[in-house]
Amino acid sequence: MFLAKVYITYKKGVLDPQGSTVKKALGTMGFDTIEDVRVGKYMEIMLEEKEKDVAEQKIKEMCDKVLTNPVIEEYSYDILEVRK
Amino acid sequence: MFLAKVYITYKKGVLDPQGSTVKKALGTMGFDTIEDVRVGKYMEIMLEEKEKDVAEQKIKEMCDKVLTNPVIEEYSYDILEVRK
């Protein structure tokens, strides 16, 4: 069994209005040393697989085909083995 | 300058309808070894601070006060030093 932690962010150069809004909101609350905020998605996917290679390949496929929009988003992941 | 990577997830036991939907969608696409999917938020916050301690304290404060709902969400973070 494997736990994949997937981090999805906008590519550099892609406007992130949600990030700008969070930055502004934090600024008005006194957090004035914030240079930049980027907001992304985080997913934890538990996979019933025996081989780490297979798990990794499936995660890549999911990310490429469904979870991200490759035009504006990029992703990275960590895969950890989990004992039940 | 510090880059904080903040991971926000629902607490265990809190229903995650977005995660269930993603799981179902992936299942219909042939990914049938998925045990569970949890969807959370991921933020990258760039802080103009000199001390790591100060940066960490600010990140904690932001998370507790603004970025998360402590009733249903929990968070973790990594803080990395970044050279301009």
Image: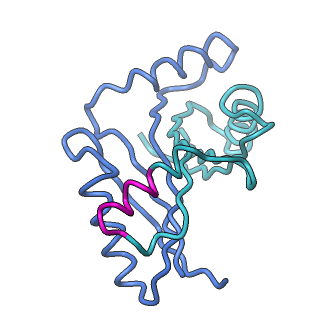
Chain colours: A cyan, B blue
Residue B7, position as x, y percentages in the image: 44, 53
**Which residue shows up at 55% across the image and 64% down it?**
A36
Residue B28, position as x, y percentages in the image: 64, 10
The main secondary structure of the magenta stretch is helix
Q: Does the magenta stretch include residue B54?
A: no
Front-most of residues B43 and B77: B43
Front-most of residues A77 and B42: B42
Residue A66, position as x, y percentages in the image: 70, 26
Q: Looking at the figure, which quarter contains the C terminus of chain A? A: top left
Give the residue furthest to the left: B71
Task: Write down the quadrant of residue A83 in the picture.
Answer: top left
**Which residue shows up at 74% across the image and 38% down it?**
A60
Question: What segment is highlighted magenta in the picture?
Answer: A22-31
Give the residue furthest to the right: A71
Task: Write down the quadrant of residue A49 in the picture.
Answer: top right
**Which residue shows up at 77% across the image and 33% down it?**
A64
Query: Can residue A3 be seen from the camera position used here?
Result: no
**Which residue shows up at 45% across the image and 24% down it?**
B18
